[in-house]
Image (cartoon, helix red, strand yellow):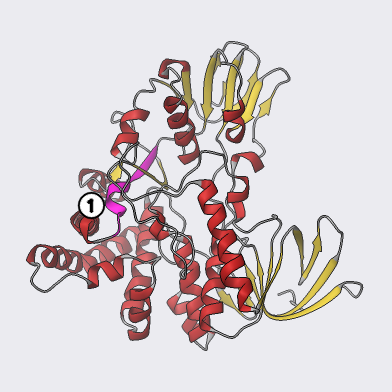
Amino acid sequence: MPSQAASNSGATQLNTDYLIVGTGAVGMAFADVLVAETDADIVMVDRFAKPGGHWNAAYPFVTLHQPSQFYGVYSRELSKGAIDQVGLNKGLHDLATGPEVSAYFDAVMRHTLLPSNRVRYFPMCNYTGDGNFEHKLSGDQFSVEASTLVDCTYLNTAVPSMHTPNFEVADGVRFMPLNDLPRLTEAPAGYTVIGGGKTGIDAILWLLEQRVNPDSITWVVSRDAWLLNRATTQPGLEFFEDTFGSQADQMEAIANAESPEDMFDRLEACNFLKRVYPEIRPTMFHAATVSDLEIVELQRIKNVVRLGRVQSIEPTQMILDDGVVAADANQLYIDCSASALPELDLKPIFTERVITPQTVRSFQPAFSASVIAHIEATRDTLEEKNRLCDPVPLPSAGVGYAQMALKSMMNQFNWGQDPEMREWLLGNRLDGFSATAAMVSTEDEGKRAILKRLRDNAFPAVTKLSEFVEAAK
């Protein structure tokens, strides 16, 4: 393992307890808990001019796709606490916009972390390894002697503007990342959206919102995706039946499933998972979250190309793995092919002098980072820390879903057996679910029945998930 000791003799020397590389959601959520629960000194390094990670390069109309209450840092609320009254998220908790998220993380840095006088922040710096980093504008070099390196770059999210397509684009082709779409000044012959994930969904919904005729939109989908039903992820007692009822349905569906394929059928039947086109069985799951109103809009797109991945785009045709699609020379191609989820191997989160944050609960990287920081602050041994923070695989379909759900449930079980962790989770706003469940009164028989059904099916679900995972080895 490389040392975190300073190694550049010509650089400014810094000493700290924690060197955090990356000030995206994970780095900020980790630092926020560490500042609140320890007296540690922290150095934070990032390549962007402001905190927020990939939000600095996000497309202008991006929003969160899960409620704002589950995102950000422990100490500061992001949500407005409002239910959307208009739009495709109508009736559900607010979704922060990209500019709102960026401003939020800037406020956390300026009003929470830096005023602690224990955080030193170095934006616009390239981390070069071994505790060394260089300022991109001044060329100043720094070497850090740190007790612990926190590598928050392991789960880097790719965004369209920072993505190099893995296919060829010929000269003369009108091609752009999603970020540039609002800058158009005249209509092309048609729009081709390349990518079937959340970014592609956002591109299509935005085009439809801008009154683009759905018949002029072509959607290139190499793999159809299973989608999470946003209505089942809502915080608060007013959504208890939808959210906790769905969690109980999910456990029941898994417990009764006869195979991973049957599990997905049952998860769809109980409305936990959704698909855009009923006649096409999805083969991908990256945890994109949608509303029913968004599904209806997406179904207006009839020209869907399912010929594998794009190989190249020429002025009058698009060549894919399994065929060729002719096109007008004035067709506009919109790149939404960047995968937000990196392909990586899981590794122990805690090793000697290095912490590598990863998800410890499905779909929730910010919450996971807060948990990891709390465990770092309160537990002594690597064995105990890693027992409570077993990394959860990133979302995927098939048996990958079983692996993800099993690890997430086992972490939740271990936290539930620890009185200190149970109490801490009740106060963690990024959790939400623990506090909501604790608010159910003993007289509310309906909600109590849902919680009982959830508990009764949890162990059978774990058993079934274990069988699926073991059978796939």
Q: Is residue 306 magenta?
A: no
Residue 305 sits above or below residue 222 on the image: above
Which residues, given as a range, are shown in magenta?
225-235
Which residue is depicted at the point 34% across and 27% down?
299
Q: Is residue 395 above or below residue 276?
A: below
Q: Quadrant of the C terminus?
A: bottom left
Disc 1: which residue: 258
In the structure shown, which secondary structural element does the residue marked by tag 1 occupy?
A: loop
**Furthest-bottom residue in this view:** 380
Left or right, 309 with reference to 206: right
Quadrant placement of the N terminus: bottom right
Residue 226 is inside the magenta segment:
yes
On the question of residue 7 being in view, the answer is: no
- Rendering quarter of residue 327: top right
Tell me the kind of residue under disc 1: Glu
Q: Residue at x 25, y 56 (%)?
A: 243
**Residue 332 position in % (x across, y down):** 59, 20
Q: How many marks?
A: 1
Figure quadrant of residue 283: top left
